[in-house]
Amino acid sequence: MKLLVINGPNINMLGIREPGIYGKQTFSDLLALLERTAREEGLEIQQFQSNHEGEIVDAIQAAYGKADGIVINPAAYTHTSVAILDALKSVAIPAVEVHISNVDAREPFRQLSYPGMYCEKTIKGLGLEGYRQAILYLKEKYGK
Ligand code: DQA
């Protein structure tokens, strides 16, 4: 099974950015978790991080016919990006949304998720563990 994990803007700053909200684990720790999970679960996991909305749209389009599932943390684009929502709908690949922080308990503008309108599940507030949970969910449901 091939999964694509997409991270949006500033996720590469994990460990440095607002550790009180996002924790002390770094982006390298996240990459290591993805590699470990791929090995343990016998999955092929490709990772893509970008600070640019159009590049995320391009990565979703490029996954068409290639990825069996998408795990996406659109970061700030969660709350603004109809383009990412439409890209997910275009490729119609099963997707799970992840947020490291508990967005429900934060500012009102973080309560709306455009990509979340497509995703079949949203995991929030579990830190990096949320990515593992999202991967396990997709493996359980769509693994072959
Ligand atoms: C985030 C939550 C978003 O509101 C924020 O803009 C981020 C990260 C999270 O993982 O908790 O950049 O997606």
Image (cartoon, rainbow, N blue to C red):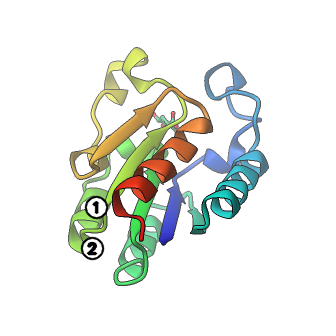
Q: Residue at x 39, y 71 (%)?
A: 68
The residue depicted at 55 percent of the width and 50 percent of the height is 9
What number of labels is visible? 2
Q: Quadrant of the C terminus?
A: bottom left
Q: Locate residue 55 relative to residue 115 in the image: left or right.
A: right
Residue 35 placed where, x, y %? 71, 60
Query: Which residue type does callout 1 highlight?
Result: Ala
**Residue at 72% from the left image edge and 55% from the top image edge:** 36
In the picture, measured across the screen, residue 39 lies left or right of residue 91, that is right
Q: Is residue 64 above or below residue 83?
A: below
How crowded is the residue under tag 2: few (<14 C-alpha within 10 Å), some, or many (20+)? some
Q: CA distance from mark 2 to mark 1?
A: 13 Å
Graded by Cα atoms within 10 Å as few (under 14), some (14 to 19) or many (20 or more), the crowding at tag 1 reads some
- Residue at which label 1 appears: 83
Determine whether, in the image, residue 16 is placed left or right of residue 78. right
Residue 132 in the image: x percent, y percent?
57, 46
**Residue linked to disc 2:** 91
Classify mark 2: helix, strand or loop: helix
Question: With respect to residue 23, does 20 lie above or below?
Answer: above
Marks 2 and 1 in Cβ contact (< 8 Å):
no
- Residue type marked 2: Val
Single out the residue that lies furthest toward the bottom: 65
The residue at the point 36 percent across, 39 percent down is 122
